[in-house]
Image: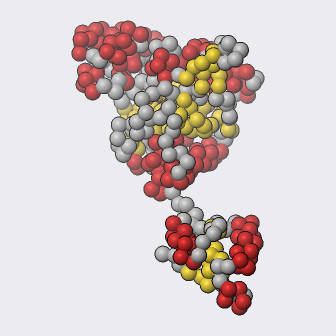
């Protein structure tokens, strides 16, 4: 489902993305959480919102042997919330968590969009203050900086306000969209009925042109929502985290409020969002738990890995090139010793000098250690540079 995941080209940068997230998360005091891939379907259908693309079209849902409907997690925020509830972590506030792992969405596969893909992410529970938003955004920026990708991305920031702001805005937006309904794509006509703010997030070029003139949420914020958003912006400015405002960032899932943000790159073509996140204060309650604020983000590991691929250092091996039976025995022991000492050793399984040197080239060895009869007799080796 995910292409080329086994090749060195993508697997090494993917690991680097995960390592960068772990290392930054550790510095912020976030602990790792591992959630199961299968959850009962309501974990997602109730929390993400019935009208979202993910729930409507993208979930891998099936009945298990017990006749229960289960879903392979399409994202991890709802899974983490479920885990917090069912593992008695509610008394551990504030709760700071990060994760990495596979997610599953039935989408049209294309560059940067797969049916099994992987995400890193961070979730902060129990912090209602703008400090929480500032911290998680700064942490996302630090992960990008750790990967050397900060200058290839820009941070776009929006607010979805509080419930009152959103209700006011929704009315203004629906009025506007009704006026130009005929020009909208079929998908967006549908969104207009079910979840009008999602029209702002449409990937359709015609829709995008139309919504360019849509009313802005910034004109419909309550005083409280505006003060909250001002505080987030002030904090980011103080930290030197650069951003631009984009009133059309809405996030795909229903549980978001206040801050919404994306880190976007121009260097990956159409699928340019590498990290997306925001505040989801209503989620826990929607899932049957107490009212508990939350804020966090998820990043696409494949997309980040494609960007970081050029700068990943792969340790070059040393190739042992034994010639003859005696040398092969010696080389086996030597390879074992050197690997135990931490060296990266390539030992071919068979072949003459030419074949083994070709192999040393192929694995990009820094040195080839040639061990022939002559060398064996004199207790030496010959060092060669393959390239
Ligand atoms: P998009 O607008 O690209 O569909 P989304 O809003 O569905 O993204 P989120 O649910 O916010 O994405 O997921 C966070 C990040 O995970 C995205 O910004 C992206 O980097 C990555 N991502 C999401 N879906 C996929 C996918 N199918 N394949 C690869 N990466 C993905
Ligand atoms: Mg999507």
Q: In the image, is residue 255 above or below residue 4? A: above
Left or right relative to 361: residue 165: left
Examine the image and state in which quarter residue 367 appears.
bottom right
In this rendered view, identify the residue nearer to me: 337 or 32.
337
Left or right relative to 212: residue 132: right
Q: In the image, is residue 254 above or below residue 157? A: above
Please name the residue shown 75% across and 24% down the image.
87
Q: In the image, is residue 74 above or below residue 40? A: below
Residue 209 appears in view: yes
Left or right relative to 15: residue 225: left
In this rendered view, identify the residue nearer to me: 251 or 226.
251
Left or right relative to 54: residue 126: right
Residue 8's x, y, as percent?
Answer: 53, 54
Examine the image and state in which quarter residue 285 appears.
top right
Residue 234's x, y, as percent?
Answer: 46, 35
Please name the residue shown 71% across and 86% down the image.
376
Please name the residue shown 26% across and 11% down the image.
181
Q: In the rendered picture of this protein, how many numbered marks are placed on residues?
A: 0
Examine the image and state in which quarter residue 250 appears.
top left
Residue 275's x, y, as percent?
Answer: 48, 37
């Amino acid at each position: 489902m995910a292409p080329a995941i086994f090749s060195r080209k993508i697997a090494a940068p993917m690991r680097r993305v995960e390592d960068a997230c772990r290392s930054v998360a550790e510095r912020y005091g976030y602990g790792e959480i591992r959630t199961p891939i299968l959850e009962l379907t309501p974990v997602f259908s109730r929390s993400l919102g019935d009208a979202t693309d993910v729930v409507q079209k993208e979930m891998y849902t099936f009945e298990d042997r017990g006749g229960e409907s289960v879903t392979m997690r399409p994202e991890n925020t709802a899974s983490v919330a479920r885990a917090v509830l069912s593992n008695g972590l509610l008394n551990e506030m504030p709760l700071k968590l990060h994760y990495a792992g596979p997610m599953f969405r039935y989408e049209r596969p294309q560059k940067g969009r797969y049916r099994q893909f992987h995400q890193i992410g961070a979730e902060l529970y129990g912090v209602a203050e703008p400090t929480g938003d500032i911290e998680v955004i700064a942490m996302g920026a630090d992960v990008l900086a750790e990967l050397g990708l900060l200058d290839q991305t820009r941070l776009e920031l929006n607010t979805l306000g509080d419930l009152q702001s959103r209700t006011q805005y929704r009315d203004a937006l629906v009025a506007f969209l009704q006026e130009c309904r005929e020009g909208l794509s079929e998908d967006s006509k549908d969104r207009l009925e079910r979840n009008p703010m999602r029209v702002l997030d449409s990937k359709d070029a015609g829709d995008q042109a139309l919504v360019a003139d849509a009313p802005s949420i910034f004109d419909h914020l309550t005083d409280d929502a505006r003060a909250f958003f001002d505080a987030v912006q002030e904090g980011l400015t103080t930290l030197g985290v650069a951003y631009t405002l984009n009133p059309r960032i809405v996030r795909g899932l229903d549980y978001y409020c206040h801050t919404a943000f994306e880190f976007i790159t121009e260097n990956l073509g159409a699928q340019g969002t590498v990290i997306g996140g925001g505040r989801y204060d209503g989620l826990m309650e929607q899932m049957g738990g107490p009212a508990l604020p939350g804020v966090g983000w998820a990043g696409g590991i494949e997309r980040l890995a494609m960007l970081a691929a050029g700068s990943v250092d792969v340790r070059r091996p040393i190739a042992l090139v034994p010639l003859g039976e005696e040398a092969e025995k010696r080389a086996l022991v030597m390879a074992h010793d050197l690997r135990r000492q931490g060296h990266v050793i390539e030992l071919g399984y068979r072949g003459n000098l030419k074949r083994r040197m070709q192999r040393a080239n192929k694995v990009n060895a820094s040195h080839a250690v040639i061990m022939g009869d002559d060398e064996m007799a004199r207790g030496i080796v010959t060092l060669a540079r393959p390239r």
